[in-house]
Image (tube, rainbow, N blue to C red):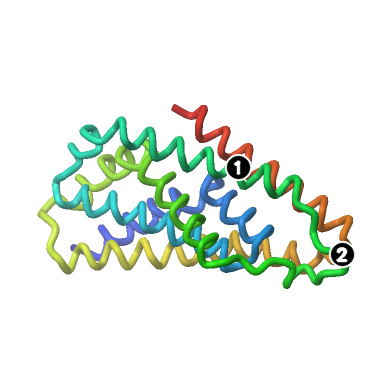
Amino acid sequence: MTLSTLLAFALTFIVFAASPGPDNFTIFTRTLSDGLRAGAAYGLGTVTGILVFLTLGLAGLSYAAEALAPYMVFIRTAGAAYLIWMGAALWFSAPPAGAPSAERVSPSRGSLFKTYATGVALNIGNPKMPLFYLAILPNVATSGITFTSYVELVAIILAVEVLVVGFYAGLALKARALTASTTVLRRMNKAAGAIMAATGVAILSNR
């Protein structure tokens, strides 16, 4: 694959990945409420979903998206419902009095896995994902895809996602560092919970 083709794919994917949307808002709110590990877990879930579609698209299995459409709707709905549930739980949660903002939450492994699974589900169940790859992959794979080309595309996706997830998680960490009082923490919990729940509602309504 030529350098110009890789650069074109990278630029297109940067715009796709970095633009504000449900995934990036969720990375921000999860980091804000539960810390970097939670935000990174959701980000890893989104990357997993992206790589699933990339692999299917390059393998010529795009028809699978149509065959699995009913299941994708179910998966997407379940993921959105979980976001709404997490948002409601965060809205009604009370931060411990006097707890430092950077240490107030220590998510369990089970919670981190659920966060990761939500990221995977919402990406696999997103009808825009196969459309995105069906639109750009024919231009990228004009002369066929080798294993080396596949690795190059995966490397680009991972590099871009590290930057994007790091950016939104970093913004949330700075916001956490500025919160010290219980009152401010409670207000930020409510704000983050509202955004998270609204994201879930937006996903459900965006058919």
Residue 207, by quadrant, is top left
- The x, y position of residue 165, in whole percent, is 52, 62
Foreground residue among 73 and 126 = 73
Q: Which residue is mark 2?
A: 97
Q: Amino acid at mark 1?
A: Trp
Q: Is residue 71 above or below residue 193?
A: above
Foreground residue among 101 and 114 = 114
- The x, y position of residue 198, in whole percent, is 63, 37
Q: Amino acid at mark 2?
A: Ala
Q: Total marks drawn?
A: 2
Screen quadrant of the N terminus? bottom left
Disc 1 packing (10 Å; few <14; some 14–19; many ≥20): some
At mark 2, the secondary structure is loop
Foreground residue among 114 and 33 = 114
Q: In the figure, is residue 201 to the left or right of 193?
A: left
Residue under the point 31% across and 56% down: 51
Q: Which residue is mark 1?
A: 85
Q: Is residue 77 above or below residue 8?
A: above
Q: Is residue 56 above or below residue 170?
A: above
Disc 2 packing (10 Å; few <14; some 14–19; many ≥20): few
- The x, y position of residue 107, in whole percent, is 61, 65
Q: In the figure, is residue 93 to the left or right of 117?
A: right
Residue under the point 87% across and 64% down: 97
